[in-house]
Image (cartoon, grey):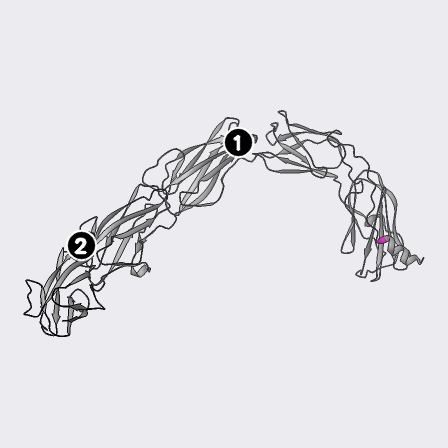
């Protein structure tokens, strides 16, 4: 076989490693920078994926029993190129290492003679001096592990060509076979490199007393604050954190409970309230855009004071009508408000109109089962307001304004035409409906029964008018409110071939006549006449 092809094929083979059972016998002690033993610390051996927890004296250990079945590669990570530099790792002391470089013809153009090296990571230039830009192959042998790499192209070198790399060109990067990872509440997370899987490794960790909320910004009262303190010297069932706000600086002591299974960690949940008085335990009095400060003093003998800050923002309240247009006086006006910053049983809004620009306060009770929601009702009148229940409106159309001042905000929330949430009150035209519109009426023994709809009349009755071709003047007669509604009225008109009679409510007719019932509505702008016509035949 062509030697170049044979070498190229060999260099494309996967990395071959020889793994032997790794002996692990590691012990050590974890102490802090004050010389105190650190118990309950989680110690991990990163590469071998072993874990231990320090005892009351701060001791940990990894033994052969714990590492049973683990067979790490003695060659460590796969060698790799970074630019023209080759990096490889020696996992054990006194491993025999050889690096050979071949050109595209299969000739060995550079070699690092087999030599025993200490454990560590090494970096070298494996190419001959003054190398040309072509394809090269490298074979790296570390103990029983052989790795083959291809490099193409190279950036050309300079200087005199040589066949053997000089020892001075081999640089040791680090001598670590694994890393200890130490984690314990109240201490800085620590990484500690080790150079052997046997021996004693004592590690000093740094005390780090902290206190912190779960997030930096809170909004409304539905989202509680979780306060967490980490203090390695605290052993009591509870510790105290002091909470203050910028607008309400009176200190509030919050007891933090010990977290089971995590030494040195304490936690508690507290709520916000945005009213003039606090209610219940673990609540923080606050206001929109308030700065919350949390302070924790470390347990003796430490003197550390840890602080943290958060911001509380109010959720924007709203106040508005349930619909944009209310017609007449027949239905009450529904006013709804939403304020997620409070839990009050009721709130007060101010309502006014163009007719009653002063207006009055209206109490909105809380809606059951819907925290933060409030709803109330107010009637409409064409005459005058009744504080708390009826608002005077200007016919035929008026715009109402509602104003709500939340205790969580400095400025009120306004619902009006400028805000695009105007509540319109509007009167509708009077509607007159005879009981026989299409067929008409016959003779003088029948009567015309009328139903009149008028949403802006508050009296029990009012007058409408009737006339005919025979009697174009006609007369006025009353219609009376129905007992089951306040906006429907009824009345009757009879027919006579003699003279009309307002007393008898009979209109004079002759031949094929036309009867017209009409009403002149002065509150409309401009005033308008509503009418309906029917036929009468002998």
- Helix, strand or loop for the magenta stretch, by majority: loop
Q: Nearer the viewer, residue 145 or 338?
A: 338
Task: Check the image and report above or below for 20 versus 429.
Answer: above
Name the residue that disc number 2 marks.
482
Q: Position of residue 415 (x, y in %)?
A: 30, 56
Asked whether the residues under the numbered discs 2 and 1 touch, taking CB atoms below 8 Å apart as contact, a structural biologist would say: no
* Quadrant of the rendered image containing residue 470: bottom left
Q: Residue at x 18, y 70 (%)?
A: 533
Q: Earlier in the sequence, mark 2 or mark 1?
A: 1
Q: Which residue in the rendered view is the most extreme toward the right?
A: 1
Write the start and end of the magenta stretch as one range.
11-16
Residue indicated by mark 1: 259
Left or right: 321, with 451 as reference point:
right
Using residue 458 as the reference point, say whether residue 201 is left or right of it: right
Compared across the picture, whether 470 is left or right of 95 comes to left
Comparing 59 with 73, the one in front is 73
Q: Which mark is residue 393?
A: none
> Percent position (x, y) of residue 99?
85, 49
Whether residue 101 is visible, yes or no, is no
Of the residues tagged 2 and 1, which is closer to the observer? 2
Separation of disc 2 and disc 1 at Cα?
71 Å
Task: Report if residue 351 is visible in the image.
Answer: yes
Q: Is residue 18 highlighted in magenta?
A: no
Which one is in front, 42 or 466?
466
Query: Based on the displayed image, in which of its 4 quarters is residue 522 positioned?
Result: bottom left
Considering the numbered disc 1 on the image, is that residue within a helix, a strand or a loop?
A: loop
Across and down, in percent, residue 260 comes to 54, 30
The C terminus lies in quadrant: bottom left
Q: Between residue 207 and residue 59, name the one nearer to us.
A: 59
Q: Secondary structure at mark 2?
A: loop
Density class for disc 1 (Cα within 10 Å; few <14, some 14-19, many ≥20) is: some
Disc 2 crowd, CA 10 A, few/some/many (<14, 14-19, 20+): some
């Amino acid at each position: 076989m062509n030697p170049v092809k044979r070498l190229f094929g060999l260099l494309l083979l996967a990395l071959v490693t020889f793994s032997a059972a790794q002996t692990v016998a590691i012990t050590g002690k974890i102490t802090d920078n004050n010389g105190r033993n650190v118990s309950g610390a989680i110690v991990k051996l990163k590469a071998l994926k072993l874990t231990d927890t320090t005892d009351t004296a701060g001791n940990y250990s990894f033994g052969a029993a714990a590492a049973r079945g683990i067979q790490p590669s003695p060659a460590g990570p796969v060698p790799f190129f970074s630019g023209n530099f080759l990096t490889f790792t020696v996992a054990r002391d006194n491993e025999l290492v050889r690096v050979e470089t071949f050109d595209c013809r299969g000739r060995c153009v550079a070699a690092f003679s087999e030599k025993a090296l200490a454990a560590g990571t090494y970096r070298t230039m494996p190419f001959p001096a003054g190398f040309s830009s072509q394809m090269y192959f490298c074979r790296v042998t570390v103990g029983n592990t052989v790795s083959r790499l291809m490099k193409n192209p190279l950036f050309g070198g300079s200087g005199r060509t040589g066949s053997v790399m000089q020892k001075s060109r081999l640089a040791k990067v680090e001598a670590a076979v694994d890393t200890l990872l130490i984690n314990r509440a109240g201490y800085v997370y620590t990484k500690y490199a080790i150079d052997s899987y046997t021996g004693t490794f004592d590690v000093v960790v740094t005390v780090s007393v902290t206190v912190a909320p779960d997030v930096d910004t809170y909004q409304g009262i539905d989202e509680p604050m979780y306060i967490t303190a980490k203090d390695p010297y605290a052993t009591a069932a509870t510790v105290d954190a002091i909470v203050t706000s910028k607008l309400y600086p009176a200190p509030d002591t919050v007891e933090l409970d010990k977290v089971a299974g995590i030494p040195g960690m304490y936690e508690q949940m507290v709520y916000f309230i945005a009213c003039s008085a606090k209610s219940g335990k673990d609540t923080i009095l606050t206001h929109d855009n308030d700065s919350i400060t949390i302070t924790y003093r470390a347990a003796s003998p430490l003197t550390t004071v840890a602080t943290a800050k958060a911001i509380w923002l109010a959720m924007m309240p709203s106040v508005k009508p349930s619909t944009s247009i209310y017609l007449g006086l027949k239905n009450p006006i529904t006013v709804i408000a939403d304020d997620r910053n409070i839990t009050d049983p009721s709130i007060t809004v101010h309502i006014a109109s163009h007719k009653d620009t002063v207006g009055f306060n209206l109490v909105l009770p809380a809606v059951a089962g819907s925290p933060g929601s409030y709803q109330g009702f107010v009637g409409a009148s064409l005459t005058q307001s009744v504080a708390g229940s009826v608002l005077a409106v200007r016919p035929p159309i008026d715009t109402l304004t509602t104003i709500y001042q939340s205790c969580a905000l400095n400025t009120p929330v306004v619902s009006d035409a400028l805000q695009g949430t105007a509540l319109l009150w509007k009167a509708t035209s009077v509607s007159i409906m005879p009981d026989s519109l299409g067929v008409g009426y016959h003779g003088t023994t029948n009567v015309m029964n009328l139903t009149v709809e008028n949403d802006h009349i508050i009296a029990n009755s009012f007058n409408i008018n009737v006339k005919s071709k025979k009697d174009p003047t006609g007369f006025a007669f009353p219609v009376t409110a129905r007992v089951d509604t306040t906006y429907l009225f009824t009345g009757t008109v009879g027919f006579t071939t003699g003279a009309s009679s307002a007393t008898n409510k009979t209109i004079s007719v002759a031949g094929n006549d036309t009867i017209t019932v009409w009403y002149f509505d002065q509150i409309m702008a401009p005033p308008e006449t509503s009418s309906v016509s029917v036929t009468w035949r002998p």
